[in-house]
Amino acid sequence: MKVALLYPEVYDMARFRSGRKEFPPFGVLYLAAVLQEAGHEVRVVKVTPLDTAPDLADCDAVGFSLSSSATYGLMSTARRRARIRPDSLIMVGGVHCNFYPHMSLTDFDAHVAAVGESEESILEVLSRAGDRNFAGVAGVLWRDGGRLRQERSRPLIRDIDELPLPARSLLPPEDLILTDRLAGTELRMTHVMFSRGCPFPCTFCAAGQTRIQYRSGSSARHELTRLIEAYGIEGFAIVDDNFIVNKRKVGDICDSIADLGLRWSALSRVDTIDPALLARMSAAGCIEIKYGMESGSETLLGAMRKNTTREQIRRAVHATVAAGIAAKVFVIHGYPGEDMTTTRETISLLTELRTALSRVSLFRFVPLPGTQVYDQAATYGVHGTHLQSDWDGRWEKFHIHHNDHHWWGDEAQWRQTQRSYDLLRDFVEQHWGRQA
C-alpha cells in the first residue's frame, strides 16, 4: 500500500524565537521504518503553517501524527485541506491522541485511532484496510458503523532493539543534521532515542508511557555507526524524556560507544546520577547533561511531585562538572503557587551554582494537556482547559514558548507572577545570556 504519514513542524524549545529546528519526528520515522520493512511504500509529510494542503491523492492510507496539543489546530487544518481520496483509510495517533483518542477520532473524521506504541498496531490496521473491521486489534479505537469501539490496550513491545532504525532517509538531510545544537558547539550532529518512557510522576509533564524501555549498547552502537557512515556526524543529542534512570543500562550504552569518538549530550534528573556513572559517561564522550531542576523552591518541587531537593541539585551539578561534563538546567517559572518568595529561592540557588552552570533555559509554566495539573485543573486552580466552562477551543495556546497566558490565580496573584518572572528572566539573561 501507499501510505502517507503527516507530522507538524515544531521549533526547538530553547530557541523558538529564532525558528531553530526541533529534533526529527521519531514516532513517525519509526512507524515509517516498520512499514517499509513490511513492503509498504511510505511518504513522510511535514505540515507547516505555510503548507497545510498536501496532495495525498495517490495514497491508500493517510496517518496524522498528533504529536502535541499545541499543533492540533495545524493538523486539523491539514485534514480539511489535504487532497485525499474518499476511499483512503484515515488514521490518527501520537501524543494528543493517546490522551484524547475519542476527540481525535471524531475531529479528524478518522476510521481508526491508535493509542500507545503503534509499530505493531499500524501493521494490523493496514491488513484490515479492505473491510475496515478492526475488531481484536489491540490498542485502537475505531468506527464500527455508527458506533465507537475501544479495543484492549496493547502491551509494550518487549524488546525495542527488534525495531528497525528510524527511516531518516525519508527526510532531507537539513532536517536531520545540524551544526548549532550540541552543547554550544558547532559539531556536526543529529538526534537519537535510546529509551522510551519515564517512570516519574511530575504533575507538569505529559508522560504517555510510565514504564521505561532501553535499547541495548549494541543497538545504540549500530545506529551511531550507521549515522557516521551516512551523514558524517561528529556528535549526537539523546532526546529521551529521561535517559539516565537505569544505571546499568546507561553504562552498557556508554561502554559500547566509547571508542566511536563522538561527543554527546543527554537529559537527566538530579537524583539518578552518581560519580561513577558520570565518569563512564565522560569517558564515552558525554560533554553536557541537561537537568530538569525546575525550581529552587522545595515547596514548589514538592507540589510538582518532582520530589528533589536543593541539596540534590547542588550535588548533581558539582559532580557533573567534576567529571568534566558541562551542566545545564531547565527552570520552569509560574507553577501554581509561584510568588516572589519562591522565585527568590530559585535565584538564590542559581546564584550558588552560577560558576558551575554552563547554560540555563527558562520556561514559563503551561498546563500541558495530559498532565495532572490539566486533568485535575480545579485542584490546582488552573483554568482554560477543555474540561471547563471557560474553554475557548484554542489548543494552540498550550505551547511552551514564552507563554504569558494567565493560567491560574486571581489578578493580584498573576501580577506578582509576572513581576517575579521578569526578575528571574533578567537574572538568567544577565548571567547566561538570552538563550530563548
Image: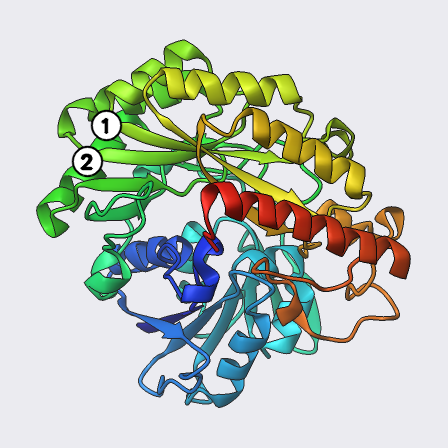
Element type at mark 1: helix
Residue depicted at 25% across the width and 57% down the height: 168
Q: Nearer the viewer, residue 131 or 12?
A: 12
Residue depicted at 77% across the width and 52% down the height: 417
Q: Which residue is mark 2?
A: 222
Q: Position of residue 251 (x, y in %)?
A: 34, 18
Element type at mark 2: helix
Decide if residue 361 is in sight here: no
The quarter of the picture where residue 286 lies is: top left
Amino acid tagged 1? Ser
Left or right, 79 with reference to 218: right
Q: Which residue is mark 1?
A: 218
Q: Position of residue 236 (x, y in %)?
A: 27, 41
* Callout 2 touching callout 1 (CB < 8 Å): yes
Left or right, 384 with reference to 215: right
Label tally: 2
Residue depicted at 87% across the width and 52% down the height: 381
Amino acid tagged 2? His
Left or right, 343 with reference to 362: right
Q: Position of residue 313 (x, y in %)?
A: 57, 23
Q: Position of residue 112 (x, y in %)?
A: 55, 68
Disc 2 to disc 1, C-alpha distance: 6 Å
Is 20 situated above or below 180?
below
